Every structure is written in structure tokens, then in C-alpha cells.
Image: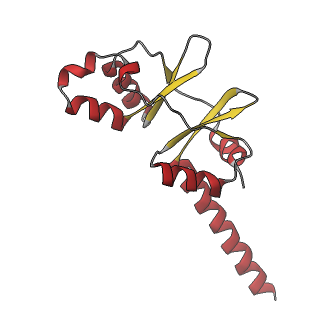
Amino acid sequence: MNVRHILAGKGDFVVAIPPDRSLEEAARLLSEKRIGALLVLGKSGEILGILSERDIVRAVARGADRLTAAVSEHMTPKVITCSLDTPVTDLMEEMTSGRFRHIPVMANGRLVGMVSIGDVVKHRLAEIEAETNAMRDYIATA
């Protein structure tokens, strides 16, 4: 199974924010959408960075006045991406070793979605359950 299967189930909607918006606006958007990260996109849609809840917490730990700072000051500028054909097991390994929970999905140089570790775990559990049921059916009919 690959990332394409995950996006087929969850959709390709990506929540993004411009780099000049404040951390307070970003926090509000994360809360409204009930998500853990925002992509920071430039005017032509290019990925400039990613801002997670953790990034906001780190900024606030340096002082509550940081909430007025621009997203670009606190985002993670180096963003790891994957493709639609990336195997789910590779994605799990990348996210675990890199210690991040969200990864944008690219196809032909375009952003086509975002996958979270929760999406990956949900997909993997469904896959394991299907394998278990198939094995039970096989044993029952043998």
C-alpha cells in the first residue's frame, strides 16, 4: 500500500497559511480545523515551510509576546515531502526517524495533499484487520 491509498480515503484538502501571518492567527486556524500543522505557502503556492503546534509552543515558551510574530519566524523551513507512490511502511519509518507527524504529498512538482501520522496508523490498522479477516476466512474454509 502507498500514500495514494491514504489520500483516496481522506481527500486532498490541505490547510495552509501565508508566511506573514501571526502565530496567533496560525494557532486559531489549527484550533478551528482541529489539525496539528499548517503548510506555509508562498504567493505562487510553493512550500516555504511547515508550522506545527510544537513550533508554536516553543515560541510561546520564549515569551507570550511571540504570538504576534510572523509564522515565517517560527516555521520549520526544511520540509520533507513524499510522493503518491511512497509505500506506507517507508512513510512510517521516515516520520518516526525524523520525529515529525505531518508530511506533504507531491506529484509532478505540485502539492496534492498532506498525510499525518494518525492517517498512516489508521490506514495500517485497517490493512492489518483486512489481512486478519482474510486469514480467518481462509482457515475457516480449509
Indicate left or right for 55 with 4 as reference. Answer: left
- Quarter of the image for the N terminus: give it: bottom right
Residue appearing at x 20%, y 29% in the figure? 62
According to the image, what is the colour scheme of the structure?
secondary structure
Please provide percent x and percent y for residue 141: 80, 85
Residue appearing at x 74%, y 45% in the figure? 85
Residue appearing at x 36%, y 21% in the figure? 73
Could you say which is closer to the camera, residue 53 or residue 6? 53
71 over 101 or under it: above or below: above
94 over 82 or under it: above or below: below
Please provide percent x and percent y for residue 15: 52, 26
Most extreme residue toward the bottom, as rendered? 142
Residue appearing at x 50%, y 54% in the figure? 97
Most extreme residue toward the right, as rendered? 142
Could you say which is closer to the camera, residue 2 or residue 71? 71
Where, by quadrant of the figure, is residue 46 drawn?
top right
89 over 60 or under it: above or below: below
